[in-house]
Structures are given as C-alpha cells and as structure tokens.
Image (tube, rainbow, N blue to C red):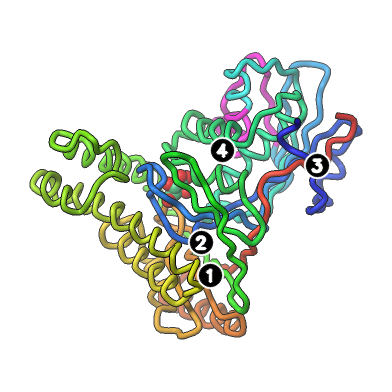
C-alpha cells in the first residue's frame, strides 16, 4: 500500500503551474508551531507541536540526464549539481535543504536519475516556523513518490532530520520534521521523543486564535548556542549517570538528582538541566489542562515556559522578552511564550478572537517605539501534514 496518497485538500500554488509537465510530482509540507515543550525533544522528552497552514511546495520533474536543477521561485535563484556527485551550495542555503535529503535517499541505496525541482513556500523564513524542515519533507516526499520508494512516514521524518544534521549542521531534535509530516487538522501532536509514540489531542478552540508575533530578528548565535545547549544537557546526564546508571537522558532525571549530582559540579549546567526537567513536567500537566479544557491553566504554563527559556535556558533575546512582557497583563491573552530554538523568530500567543486586531495593532506600535523594529504578525491555523498534491502518470 502506498504510504502517501494524493490530497485534494490543498490547492497547488499558481506559480508552480509553469513548472508542471505531465510527469511532475507536486508535494506540500507545512511549517509548525509548538504549544509547549521546548528544547525537550533532543532530551528524549515530550513536545506538543502542530503543522500549520503555511507550507513549502515542490514540483519535481524527471530529466533524461543525471543533472539536478533546482529553482527557488520566491528568490528567483537556481542551482545545478549532479546526482552522482552532489555538491553543497556555498552561496545560498535553500538548495542545501533540498540536496541534504537527496543524499539521504542515495545513502539508503535508492537509484535516482536527474530531475528538475522547483520550490515555493509561504512560510516566513527565519521566523522559527521550521521552513527548513518543511522543505526537507516536501522534497523527501517528492523523491519518494517519483522514484517509487514507498517510505513510511517515520522513516521520511528520520531521513529529513538526518539531512538537517549532516547538510545544515544543526543537531536538531525530531520535533520539526515529525510535526510537518504527521500534522493533523485541528489537532496538536503529543509526541514522546523517546519512544516516538504519539497521540493527537484536539485543539479546535472556539473563540481563541493562535497569533504568531514575529520579532523579525535572528541573532547569529542561534545554531552554535543550540548545539552548546545540547552538550550541556548531555554533560548533566553524564554526571548523574556516575551515581544513577539508569539515567539515560534528562527525561529520566528528577530535580533531586540534579541537586545531588549536577549542582555541585557546575551551576550553569544545573540551570540548563533544571529547565528541561521542569519543562517535561509542565508539558504533562498542560496536556491534562487541555483534556480538562482549562485553557487558562494551559496558558499560564506557556508563560512559565517562557520564564524558564529566558532565565534558566537563556535562549530568549530582548525582542522576544519584550513581546511576551507586553501582552502578559492583557486579559485577552491566554498564554504567550517564545517558540522554537530561540534567539529570534516568533512568540506564540493564544488570544481571544475579538481582541486579535487590537492586540496586533498595539503591539506593533509598542515594538516599534521600544525596540525600533517592525513587527510582523500571522494567524496560524492547524493543518494536515505532508502530502502529495499531484502525481499524474505515476
Ligand atoms: C528547533 C529544533 C527542534 C527543537 C526546537 C526547540 O526548532 O529543530 O528539534 O529542538 O528547536 O524546541
């Protein structure tokens, strides 16, 4: 049975029509939000992401030679390489997200000919909405369909994550690619990043909108700080293991263990680990709030997550802190926090529907006045994950 079926739920962007031949495969893979559970995925913890209504689209057409021609429609840029000798682009990053996954298919032994692939996306780049994971997954699905590989969803997710590790150089967890592929309309995914078991929790909230406030900044320390946090967490685990061999990751740790075995060694590593242990606990409690439909309690935990990310894990920045603080006492805002890896990108806000316009207008002015930056705002709807939109003749 084919793992992926053609979807009629989404229309094909107009701009892709120019790249559409009878043998073209067109795929869509969305960006993601994460309600709670940040920096927990690579610590074998839990996350609560969802795919959104902003996506990357790829139109892939076979060639008779072994060349790979890539086009970014949005950037009006192209890149050419060869299937037998895939070379990384040194000028632009977008081709590498496409090529990283091609290489994974090659490594898995898939025999591939040349192809043209055109990319377009409506996910804001650098906003922390995982546009790179979306491109990797859209490309992976296009290759799967075109070369008739028949991958299951989880294998595609793992290959896309590996592409990010090996081609983009970020030691990311599994959340972004998982959410992009497994997303389900009006549901968040409670994912256990250790067992990879997951459940869909309904998240259709009458009268509440998901508002993303985009700082429009991306501080350069992002990926190095990300990898550094990962190492600090691993260091904490190694210290605990000397006394508690059953602790394989921070998922298995308790605050008492941290107090006993990590705090005496290093206060900063302790602080990082404390955040992660608390965040896992917070997510489990937040899921109970969701099941009890107690959105106020859920939102309060989002604020607590922000506090932890800002003060203990130290992956926030003045712009993100400003955006959370400025909405904090607004009764129409149920919860808000920075989202994703940090050092820029968006805050995620749960906002009473009738207050959304005023909130965006007021925050835009305040942000401009205080941070001298232009704010962007998006309303996110929770949508279905990666799908094939067209595959005539296959
Ligand atoms: C990035 C990574 C994810 C995850 C988040 C933080 O988005 O790609 O794997 O670690 O940061 O929660």
Answer with mark 3 or mark 4, whichever residue precedes in sequence.
3
Answer with mark 4 or mark 1, whichever residue precedes in sequence.
4
Residue numbers of the magenta segment: 78-101
Answer with mark 1 or mark 2, whichever residue precedes in sequence.
2
Q: Is residue 224 left or right of residue 124?
A: left
Answer with mark 4 or mark 2, whichever residue precedes in sequence.
4
* Pointer 1 residue: 375
Placement of 106 over or under 240, stated as above or below = above
Q: Nearer the viewer, residue 363 or 55?
A: 55
* Pointer 3 residue: 6
Placement of 255 over or under 6, stated as above or below = below
* Pointer 4 residue: 93
Placement of 10 over or under 207, stated as above or below = above
Quarter of the image that includes the N terminus: top right
Could you say which quadrant of the image residue 229 lies in? Answer: top left
Q: Position of residue 209 (x, y in %)?
A: 59, 73
Q: Nearer the viewer, residue 113 or 126?
A: 113
Residue 66's disc number: none
Q: Position of residue 273 (x, y in %)?
A: 25, 49
* Pointer 2 residue: 216
């Amino acid at each position: 049975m084919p793992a992926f079926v053609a979807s009629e739920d989404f229309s094909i962007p107009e701009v892709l029509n120019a790249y559409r031949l009878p043998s073209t495969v067109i795929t869509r893979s969305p960006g993601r939000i994460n309600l709670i559970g940040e920096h927990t995925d690579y610590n074998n913890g839990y996350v609560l992401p969802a795919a959104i209504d902003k996506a990357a689209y790829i139109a892939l057409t076979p060639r008779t030679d072994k060349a790979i021609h890539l086009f970014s429609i949005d950037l009006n840029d192209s890149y050419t390489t060869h299937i037998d000798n895939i070379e990384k682009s040194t000028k632009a990053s977008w081709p590498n997200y496409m090529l990283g996954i091609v290489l994974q298919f090659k490594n898995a032994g898939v025999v591939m000919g040349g192809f043209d692939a055109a990319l377009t996306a409506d996910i804001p780049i650098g906003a922390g909405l995982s546009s790179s994971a979306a491109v990797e997954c859209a490309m992976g699905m296009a290759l799967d369909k075109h070369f008739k590989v028949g991958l299951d969803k989880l294998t595609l997710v793992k290959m896309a994550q590996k592409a990010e590790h090996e081609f983009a150089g970020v030691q990311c967890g599994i959340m972004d690619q998982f959410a992009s592929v497994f997303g389900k309309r009006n549901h968040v995914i409670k994912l256990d990043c250790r067992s990879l078991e997951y459940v869909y929790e309904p998240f259709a909230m009458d009268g509440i909108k998901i508002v993303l406030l985009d700082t429009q900044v991306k501080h350069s320390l992002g990926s190095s700080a990300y990898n550094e946090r990962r190492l600090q967490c691993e260091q904490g685990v190694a210290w605990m293991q000397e006394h508690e061999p059953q602790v394989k990751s921070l998922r298995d740790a308790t605050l008492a263990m941290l107090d006993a075995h990590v705090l005496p060694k290093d206060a900063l590593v302790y602080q990082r680990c404390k955040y992660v242990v608390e965040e896992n606990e917070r997510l489990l409690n937040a899921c109970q709030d969701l099941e009890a439909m107690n959105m106020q309690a859920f939102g309060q935990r989002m604020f607590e997550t922000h506090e932890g990310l800002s003060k203990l894990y130290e992956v926030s920045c003045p712009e993100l802190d400003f955006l959370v603080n400025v909405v904090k006492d607004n009764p129409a805002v149920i919860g808000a926090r920075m989202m994703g890896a940090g050092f820029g990108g968006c805050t995620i806000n749960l906002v009473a529907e009738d207050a959304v316009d005023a909130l965006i207008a007021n925050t835009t002015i305040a942000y401009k006045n205080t941070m001298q930056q232009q704010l962007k705002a998006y309303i996110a709807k929770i949508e279905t994950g990666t799908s094939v939109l067209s595959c005539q003749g296959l």
